[in-house]
Amino acid sequence: MGRQERESRGGEKEEAGYQQMTFEAMEGLAPPEITLERCVVTVLPTYRKKGQGYQWECVVKELPDLFNQESEETYHLHAATYAKEAHSKRLRPGDVLQLWGVISTQELPLQSGETETLHHLTVSKIAVLKRAPRRTITIFEAERHKGL
């Protein structure tokens, strides 16, 4: 399979081969994986069933650092194959993360004629750098503070 024989005009048979891309040529096709060093979760993540698998989504804001003072982009995170692992991190707003993944941008035209750019990141790995304070309130404490 992969080669076919065909007759040329002179009656001789010649082989017509298929050209297959080499692995080196395919390396340029895959978008590069980037690392976002410090991001803070701004919206509570969602985890829902989608088809045969699950979909995890979250919104984070990149924090400025020493080298990139003006980088305060908002990223919409998505995970399908990594959804279960991302959900197991139990992220909450205020958590500080380090993220790895493939970035893409989407241009949305607005009615005013301007365009808004959304940054999407398909997550491949998440590391929690710092957790936001968790407040656990028992029913008894909640009822006691209502009357005050």
Image: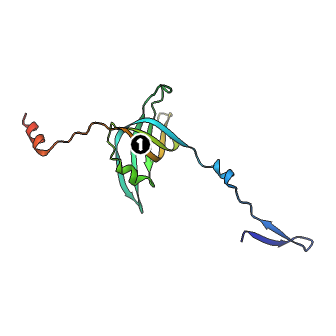
Task: Label 1: state its secondary structure.
Answer: strand
Residue 109 visible? The answer is: no
Residue 79's place in the image compared with 97, above or below, is below
**Residue on which the image places disc 1:** 127
Q: Quadrant of the N terminus?
A: bottom right
Residue 14 horizontal side relative to residue 90, left or right: right
Residue 53's place in the image compared with 139, above or below, is below
Residue 109 x/y as whole percent: 50, 39
Question: 87 or 143, which lies in front?
Answer: 87
Q: How is the image coloured?
A: rainbow
Q: Residue at x 64, y 49 (%)?
A: 27
Residue 94 visible? The answer is: yes
Q: Residue at x 70, y 55 (%)?
A: 22
Query: Could you say which quadrant of the image residue 146 lies in?
Result: top left
Kind of residue indicated by mark 1: Ala
Residue 136 x/y as whole percent: 20, 42
Residue 2 x/y as whole percent: 72, 68
